[in-house]
Structure formats: C-alpha cells, structure tokens
Amino acid sequence: MRICYKKLWMLLIQRDISKVTLRKDLGIAAGTMSKLNKGEEVALSVLLRICDYLDCDIGDICEAVRETQG
C-alpha cells in the first residue's frame, strides 16, 4: 500500500490555495513538503494540522492505494 495525496492537491486548487501558502501558513518544513509532493509518508501530526487548516477530515486529503503486483 502507498499513500496518495491527490485529494489534497485538488482541494487546494478548489480553494485557490498554493502549496507555498499552505507550507508557510502551517510552518511545514521544506523536506516534509517534498515528501508530500513525492507521495511519501509524512507524520500524522502534519496531516492533522493540514486538516485543521482546511477544516476537513483526513480522508479528504489522502487515501491509501493498493499497489498492483505484476
């Protein structure tokens, strides 16, 4: 399984919030933002801060995706 943040990026577009604004407003480290961009795991506390900022649930910003075996 892997994590997908596509829902987060779509929500930011819908609300006209840039990734830079999100990072600055929440004080997210550049390295953590890089992990989000690459679809890597980040701390749950970061995801919860994003949810609080956007007034949404965690399922609104990310989802677990089963990787296909080939």
Image (tube, rainbow, N blue to C red):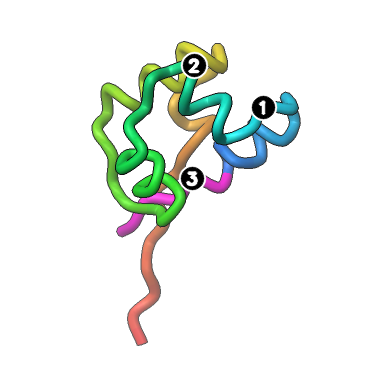
Q: Which residue occupies 31% across, 43% down? A: 31
Q: Which of marks 2 and 3 is nearer the N terminus?
A: 3
Residue span colored magenta: 1-6
Disc number for residue 70 = none
Disc number for residue 25 = 2
Q: For the residue marked with disc 1, what is the amino acid?
A: Ile
User: Does 2 lie within the magenta span?
Assistant: yes
What distance separates the C-alpha of mark 1 from that of mark 2? Answer: 11 Å
Residue 54: horizontal and vertical position, in percent? 56, 17
- Pick the front one: 20 or 7: 20
> Which residue matches tag 3?
5
Q: Quadrant of the C terminus?
A: bottom left
Vertical side of 16 occupied by 69: above or below: below
Q: Which of marks 1 and 2 is nearer the N terminus?
A: 1
Judged from the image, the secondary structure of the residue bearing numbered disc 1 is loop
Judged from the image, the secondary structure of the residue bearing numbered disc 2 is helix
Q: For the residue marked with disc 3, what is the amino acid?
A: Tyr
Residue 52: horizontal and vertical position, in percent? 46, 12
Q: Do the residues labelled 2 and 3 touch (CB within 8 Å)?
A: no
> How many numbered discs sit on the rendered protein?
3
> Which residue matches tag 1?
17
Judged from the image, the secondary structure of the residue bearing numbered disc 3 is loop
- Left or right: residue 18 versus residue 46 is right
